[in-house]
Image: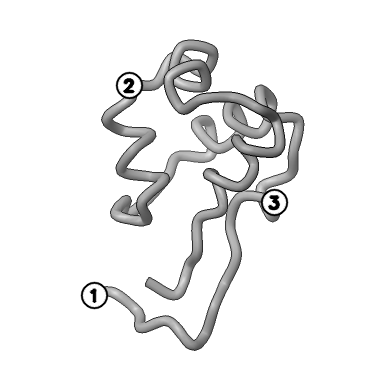
Amino acid sequence: MAIVIRLDEKLHERRMTLTELSERVDITLANLSILKTGKAKAIRFSTLEAICSVLDCQPGDLLAFDPTQPMQE
């Protein structure tokens, strides 16, 4: 996927577990895992906003475009 998810790095910076983020954002651990591993096909702006609010970051801190990665169809 040409979009790279940097959620793991931001969680490490904030010394927060995926479980803690799941509880604070009120999103299932399974759905956050799908996002973290880059298997998600989409993300709602409301979800992105909630994650950014809890992690005190910008969307660009979590998502990056890497043209060397193959695009998914």
**Which residue is the extreme one toward the bottom?**
68
Secondary structure state at the residue bearing disc 1: loop
In percent of width and height, residue 65 lies at: 57, 72
Label 3: few (<14), some (14–19) or many (≥20) C-alpha neighbours in 10 Å: some
Residue 57 location (% of width, % of height): 74, 38
On screen, 25 above or below 69?
A: above
Q: Earlier in the sequence, mark 3 or mark 1?
A: 3
Q: How far apart are labels 1 and 2 at the CA level?
A: 25 Å
The quarter of the rendered structure image containing the N terminus is: bottom left
Query: What's the distance in space between the residues labelled 3 and 1, CA to CA?
Result: 24 Å
Residue 64's spot in the image, x, y percent?
60, 65
> Which comes sooner in the sequence, label 3 or label 2?
2
Instruction: Look at the numbered disc 3 and give the secondary structure of its residue.
Output: helix
**Residue hosting label 2:** 28
Q: Label 2, secondary structure: give it.
A: loop
Frontmost of labels 1 and 2 is 2
Q: Residue at x 61, y 50 (%)?
A: 62
Q: Residues within 10 Å of mark 2 (few under 14, many from 20)?
A: few
Q: Nearer the viewer, mark 3 or mark 1?
A: 3
The answer to whether residue 23 is left or right of residue 6 is: left
Identified by mark 1, the residue type is: Glu
Q: Is 41 above or below relative to 23?
A: below
Task: Say if 16 sits above or below 12 in the image.
Answer: above
The amino acid type, in three-letter code, at marker 3 is: Asp
Residue, disc 1: 73
Residue behind mark 3:
61
Residue at point 56%, 53% (across, down)? 6
The amino acid at mark 2 is Thr
Residue occupying the point 53% across, 44% down: 8
Could you say which quadrant of the image residue 36 lies in?
top left
**CB-based contact (under 8 Å), mark 3 and mark 1:** no
